[in-house]
Image: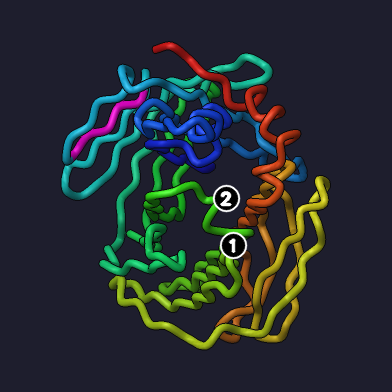
Amino acid sequence: MTIIAFLGSVFSPYYAFSRRFGGGDPLRHCALHVALYRTGDQAGPKRWTMTERDAGSVTRDATHLRIGPSGLRWDGSRLTIALDERTMPLPARVRGTVTLHPAAFTGYEALLSETGNHRWTPLSPRARVEVALEDPSLRWSGDGYLDGNHGDGAIETAFRRWDWCRAPLGTESVILYEADHRGGGGVRLALRIDRNGIVRPIDPPPAATLSRSLWRVRRRTRSDDGWAEVRRTLVDAPFYARSLIGTRLLGQRCLAVHETLDCDRFANPAVQAMLPFRTPRAAW
């Protein structure tokens, strides 16, 4: 399961269109993205929501964020997410509660872009998650992760692509982040984070090639011995892939979550024309 709260959705075709004409108030382009994945031998999202909403549908303060009918609330020790969303393109509901209990906070922030206007924070690399959904009827608990991205510009103008990977290893986590800058060069992060949230940079492992997605998105990662393989593609889009991969990090074979974003493809007019079918815009 993946949940992302967007204030100024980086994947919004409406936001991209308004920026081209000198506008682009981020609060007019907010969304709560939810993806549920099938279990067992079945792959792909079981539910997908990403309805964009205007500023009038958004309220926020230091402990609370509401986007349309859904909301997030922080009480000092846990994050409670109340979901009430509809899927596209086939109509279905995602309604219920997800509660995240962070194990520890890192206090770490990385500058991803050349100008420093794109930043990433692995807020809590390990957390306990409790899922209680009414529609679809689903209850489970397990390991989770909480991070945040902050930007003061369009991602497609700052980056050509990026790859991100998170692997839980016992009481530790390893996170890999590679971003190619639009003007050349880039960022190569390899972090080892312990149970107390202490972040220690490590040398990036050797590069490892992953198979392309169905949309032919090129995926890359790193592993101790240069080997990695895609176990399951969870999201397959023309410019983005979210996957489960097998890899080796810190001397351990592990199952990791991997994401690839191709910003060149995202900016392609043909891709922009396809996006409204998966990211509808609501007036409330």
User: What residue lies at 68% left-to-right and 63% top-to-bottom?
Assistant: 245
Taking the magenta stretch, the answer to whether it contains residue 65 is: yes
Q: Quadrant of the N terminus?
A: top right
Q: Which residues are magenta?
A: 63-67
The answer to whether residue 173 is above or below residue 46 is below
Dividing the picture into quadrants, the one containing residue 57 is: top left
Q: Secondary structure at mark 2?
A: helix
Foreground residue among 167 and 12: 12
Q: Secondary structure at mark 1?
A: loop
Residue 182 tag number: 1
Dividing the picture into quadrants, the one containing residue 258 is: bottom right
User: What residue lies at 77% left-to-right and 45% top-to-bottom?
Assistant: 41
Magenta segment main secondary structure: strand
Toward the front, the furthest residue is 22
Tell which circle, 2 or 1, labels the residue nearer the N-terminal end.
2
Residue 114 lies left or right of residue 159; in this view the side is left
User: What residue lies at 37% left-to-right and 36% top-to-bottom?
Assistant: 7
